[in-house]
Amino acid sequence: GSATLTDKRIDPRVNSVATASTVTPSIALYDQYDFTALASSLSVLAPVGSPVNGDKLIFRILDDGTPRALTWNSIYREISTLLPAATVANKVIYVGCIYNGNSSYWDVIAVAIQT
């Protein structure tokens, strides 16, 4: 059979933690990774799982009031925007990625920093 999604909602799967020093995103488990009070530098490693072309992955990062260094695995490919190398004290950062199945990269299509 088939099902329709008319007037239905698909909630994103969000992993929210206060802080971490590394994150290995699992595309099978979460669509968004939130850091609410980052208290150390953060290394974003390559995602695990079997992404399909067009999968989305979002990072929302807020430090604990002190700027923190951010490093990104090379699987995150900058597309007309630069990956942030550090947080900005007390400012939310969003990083939006889409999986490019043709080249096996997570294309970073958006970076937004709270003003």
Image (cartoon, rainbow, N blue to C red):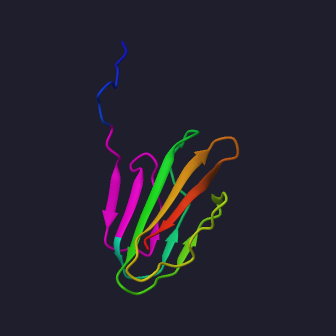
Residue 103 in picture, x, y percent from top left: 70, 46
Residue that sits furthest to the right in the current view: 103
Q: Is residue 91 shown left or right of residue 105?
A: left
Q: Position of residue 40 (x, y in %)?
A: 42, 82
Question: Which is nearer the eye, 79 or 24?
Answer: 79
The image quarter in which residue 93 lies: bottom left
Quadrant (top left, top right, bottom left, bottom right) of the N terminus? top left
Q: Can you tell which quarter of the image residue 11 is in?
A: top left
Vertical arrangement, residue 72 with respect to residue 106, above or below: below
- Residue 62 rendering spot, x and y as whole percentages: 38, 73
Outermost residue, top direction?
Answer: 1
- The location of residue 82, given as percent across then percent down, is 63, 67
Q: Residue at x 37, y 69 (%)?
A: 35
Q: Residue, x 48% and y 61% (percent of image)?
A: 24
Q: Is residue 7 left or right of residue 75?
A: left
Give the number of callouts. 0
Q: Is residue 7 magenta?
A: no
In this view, 18 is above or below 109:
below
Q: Decide whether residue 34 is among the magenta residues.
A: yes
Q: Locate the C terminus and report the quarter of the image it occupies.
A: bottom left
Boundaries of the magenta span: 10-35
Q: Residue at x 34, y 26 (%)?
A: 5
Magenta segment main secondary structure: loop
Find the residue positioned furthest to the bottom.
66
Dividing the picture into quadrants, the one containing residue 46 is bottom right
Q: Is residue 48 left or right of residue 39?
A: right
